[in-house]
Image (spheres, rainbow, N blue to C red):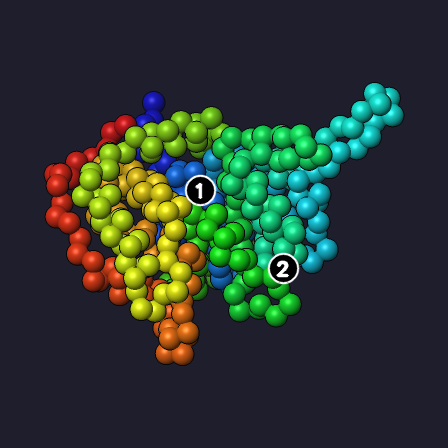
Amino acid sequence: MATAYECANLVMDEVKKVVTGKDDRIQKAFAAILAGGHILLEDVPGVGKTTLAVAFSRAMGLMNQRVQFTPDVMPADILGFSMYQKETGRFEYRQGPIMCNLFLADEINRTSPKTQSALLEVMEESVVTIDGVSHPVPDPFVVIATQNPKGSAGTQLLPESQLDRFMICMSMGYPDLHSEIAIAKGKSIKNDMEQVRGILDAKALTQIQEVVEQVQVHDHVYSYICKLVQSTRENPYIELGISPRGTLACVRMTKAWAFLEGRSYATPEDVYQVFKDIGKHRIVLNTKARVTHVTEEAVLDQILSEVPQPASYMEKKEYRG
C-alpha cells in the first residue's frame, strides 16, 4: 500500500502530464491544498492557470465546479438560493456551484464586490448561509481563483482584507524555450487531460492533510517565521505588513512543503521557499516604494536576505509516513 508521501508524488506526476515545465508551481499549489488553504493565481491569460486547477481536481478525484466571473454574476449564482415548494409549503435550498470540493473562480476581479465578498465569506467559514440557515460545504474545500493583473480596466480589485483569505498568491509565468517546444509538439489540452488518472479521493486527501499537520516544527523555525513577518511591519517601503493570519499560513505552508520534500520535520529552507508566495499579496507598499518603482517581490527578497536563517538542528532523513 502506497504511503501518503508516495500518493502525493503520484498526484503531482499526473498534473505534470498537462502542465509542462512548471514543477515548482505545481508543488507550491499542491502544498497549499495539503495545508488546507486557498490559491490565487495572478497572471496573463493562456499560461495554464485553469489547466492547473482542472488537472488537480482530476488527479485528486474531487468534485469540481468552475464559474467564469463577469459583472452580472450575483451571489445567488455562486451560493445557491431558497425556492418555495408549493407541495410542502416550505422553502428548500437549491445548491449553487460552490457546493463542491474544488471551486475554480475564473477572473475573480471582473465581478462585483458583493459577489466577491460572498465567495470570500464561504472561504473563511466553510459554510453557505441562505435565509439564516447554514449549509456546510463539502470537506475538503479548496478555492482556486484567477485574475489578470494587466487587464485591470473596469475590474474590481480585491481589497487587502479579502486577499488575506488566500493562503498563497503565485503566477505561472511563461514557459521556457524547451517547455514551449514540448507544448507545441504535444497533443491538445483536451486529449492530454483525459490521460490524467485519479490517484486520490476526497477522503484520502483529508487523511494526507492530517499527516501534513503532524509535521514537526522546531522553535527555531517558528522564531524564523515570526522574525520575517515582523520585518515586513518595520520595513521602510511597506505601509501594511503581514498579518497574524499570514503567520499561520506560513507555518502551514512550511509543513506542507517539508512533507512534499520527503521529511517529517520542517527546516528554515522550507520557510525560505514559501515565504514570498504567502507574503506578496499581504503587504501594501507605501508611496516611497511606488515612486522608486520597488516591487513587493523585491522587498521580500531584501527581507529574506537580511534576516539570518537559524542553523539546521536535525539530520536530514526521508519521511516514511
Q: Alpha-carbon neighbours of circle 2 within 10 Å: few (<14), some, or many (≥20)?
A: many
Disc 1 secondary structure class: loop
Q: Amino acid at mark 2?
A: Arg
Q: Relative to 66, is 9 on the left or the right?
A: left
> Which residue is found at the position 67% from the left and 30% from the top?
133
On the image, the x and y values in percent for residue 290 come to 41, 74
Q: Is residue 269 above or below residue 296?
A: above
Q: Is residue 90 visible?
A: yes
On the image, the x and y values in percent for residue 119 come to 59, 45
- From the image, tell me which residue sits under label 2: 110
Q: Alpha-carbon neighbours of circle 1 within 10 Å: few (<14), some, or many (≥20)?
A: many
Q: Is residue 14 visible?
A: no
Q: How many marks?
A: 2
Of the 4 image quadrants, the one containing the C terminus is top left
- From the image, tell me which residue sits under label 1: 37
> Which residue is found at the position 71% from the left and 43% from the top?
76
On the image, the x and y values in percent for residue 61 come to 51, 33
Q: Is residue 119 above or below residue 171?
A: above
On the image, the x and y values in percent for residue 231 come to 28, 58
> Which residue is found at the position 27% from the left and 49% from the top?
226
Depth check: 278 or 288 in front? 288
Q: Relative to 79, is 205 on the left or the right?
A: left
Q: Amino acid at mark 1?
A: Gly
Q: Relative to 235, is 170 on the left or the right?
A: right
Disc 2 secondary structure class: helix
**Residue 275 — which label?**
none
> Which residue is found at the position 24% from the left and 43% from the top?
222
Depth check: 204 or 12 in front? 204
Q: Mark 2 or mark 1: name the one nearer the start of the chain.
A: 1
